[in-house]
């Protein structure tokens, strides 16, 4: 593996995810201050993922056929521009439009960087390298919510949006000067058609369906958590924005600390990957259900930390399988399928839970979210077990 390229992509992703994370604790409150209902807040959160849902598979296939560095740079330039647009937003509708554009910009960055890492990953180290790279996402997202809450408390609601644009610009410089302009790659299955026809093989792949099921349901309950936890915490415990940021960061902090060790674990025991997906996914989902019954910030923090630790186990196995399937169908196509499935959950989760918040109560939404995560863990483990539960490619 080319360590200098990996290091550059790792640092760039940390910076990008830090920029995304800084607005996590304030966006629901920002939208609520404009008069947004629970459903509208869910729609605003979903807008980001809606763009990713439809664009990610196409961009992933496109990235396999073109130079990834140029795609990364285009996405970061668009990301900077849209970050600044948040400051001038004055209605829930405009916020939704900005989120849609931001989601499209992000598709040009994170899944493309992920596929680049997959291209340089040696055989037999899928769990190790893939999960080491994923640590960059969690490191950025772990620090982002705390930084965003602190900036909001000390410098006002607009400060996190300015911070996001500055951090995105720093990532652009890193990509420009440190990442080589690698040529397009050809998957083992040979060249495939462009557009949707080129995606058909990966969407017929049973192990990839297991991976996509896991990430779709995890996206559902995790983004539901991000959308409505700030409102729950303020309502039941009188939390500050900084306190909300600390709890949101705890999940990502857990992922940043244990994702790589979990990657080593799934490489060491490849035949137990289905068990890792099952137990990690089930216990994390049950932790989500328990959030509904919490009344103190300490309990919120501990359960969020538990979700992060448990999710790292199941996610590590899924990432290893995804990298192996990427060698067959193309790393960009596999990363695009992963991003699209995650985005499907991120779109539907905030919308469905937003309706529940409007019709019932915030705690009920967390119970429903946990049950969806539980069903997803069971379904994904079943789909993966149909392939024998072990290494899916060599």
Image (cartoon, grey):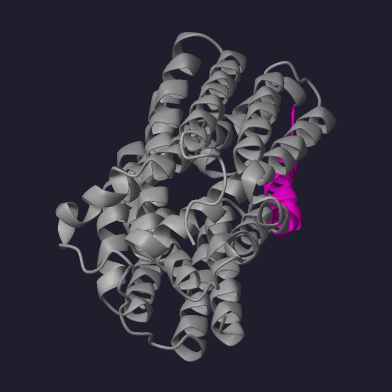
Q: Position of residue 159 (x, y in %)?
A: 57, 59
Number of marks in the rendered image: 0
Along the line of sight, the residue nearer the viewer: 159 or 212: 212
Image position, residue 320 (x, y; %): 56, 55
Q: Is residue 76 magenta?
A: no
Relative vertical location of residue 294 with respect to residue 245 in this rendering, above or below: above
Predominant SS of the magenta segment: helix
Residue 261 belongs to the span the image colors magenta: yes
Quarter location, residue 108:
bottom left
Placement of 27 over or under 77, stated as above or below? above
User: What residue sits 45% from the left and 38% below the top?
Assistant: 210
Question: Horizontal and vertical percent for residue 339?
Answer: 41, 50
Q: Residue 323 location in percent, x, y?
A: 48, 59
Residue placed most toward the observer, 113 or 148 = 113
Residue at 33% across / 80% down in the picture?
70
**Residue 67 shows in the view:** yes
**Residue lying farthest to the top in this orientation:** 360
Pick whichever, 375 or 162, lies toward us: 375
- Quarter of the picture containing the N terminus is bottom right
Front residue of 377/112: it is: 377
* Residue 248 visible in image: no
93 relative to 42 in the view: left or right: left
Residue at image point 53% right, 66% down: 16
The residues colored magenta run: 238-262
189 shown above or below 70: above
Residue displayed at 35% across by 69% down: 75
């Amino acid at each position: 593996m080319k360590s200098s390229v990996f290091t550059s992509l790792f640092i760039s992703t940390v910076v990008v995810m830090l920029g995304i994370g800084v607005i996590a604790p304030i966006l629901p409150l920002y939208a609520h201050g404009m008069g947004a209902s629970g459903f509208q807040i869910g729609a605003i959160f979903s807008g980001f993922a809606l763009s990713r849902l439809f664009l990610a598979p196409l961009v992933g296939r496109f990235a396999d056929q073109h130079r990834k560095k140029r795609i990364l740079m285009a996405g970061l330039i668009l990301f900077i521009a849209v970050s600044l647009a948040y400051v001038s937003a004055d209605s829930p509708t405009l916020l939704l439009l900005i989120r849609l554009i931001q989601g499209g910009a992000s598709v040009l960055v994170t899944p493309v960087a992920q596929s680049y890492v997959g291209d340089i990953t040696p055989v037999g180290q899928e769990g190790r390298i893939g999960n080491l790279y994923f640590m960059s996402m969690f490191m950025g997202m772990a620090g982002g919510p705390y930084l965003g809450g602190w900036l909001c408390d000390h410098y006002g609601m607009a400060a996190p949006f300015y911070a996001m644009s500055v951090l995105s610009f720093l990532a652009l410089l890193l990509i420009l000067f440190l990442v080589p302009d690698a040529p397009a790659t050809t998957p083992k299955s040979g060249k495939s058609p462009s557009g949707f026809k080129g995606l058909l093989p990966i969407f017929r792949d049973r192990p990839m369906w297991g991976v996509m099921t896991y990430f779709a349901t995890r996206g559902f309950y995790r983004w539901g958590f991000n959308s409505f936890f700030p409102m729950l915490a303020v309502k039941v415990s009188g939390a500050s924005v900084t306190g909300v940021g600390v709890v949101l960061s705890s999940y990502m902090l857990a992922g940043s600390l244990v994702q790589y060790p979990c990657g080593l674990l799934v490489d060491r025991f490849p035949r137990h990957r289905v068990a890792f997906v099952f137990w990690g996914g089930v216990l994390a989902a049950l932790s989500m259900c328990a959030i509904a019954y919490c009344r103190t910030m300490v309990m919120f923090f501990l359960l969020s930390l538990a979700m992060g630790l448990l999710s790292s186990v199941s996610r590590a196995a899924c990432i290893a399988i995804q990298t192996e399937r990427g060698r067959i169908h193309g790393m960009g196509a596999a990363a695009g399928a992963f991003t699209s499935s995650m985005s499907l959950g991120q779109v539907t989760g905030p919308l469905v839970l937003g309706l529940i918040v409007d019709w019932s109560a915030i705690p009920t939404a967390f119970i429903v979210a946990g049950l969806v995560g539980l069903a997803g863990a069971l379904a994904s483990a079943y789909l993966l077990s149909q392939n024998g539960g072990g290494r899916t490619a060599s």
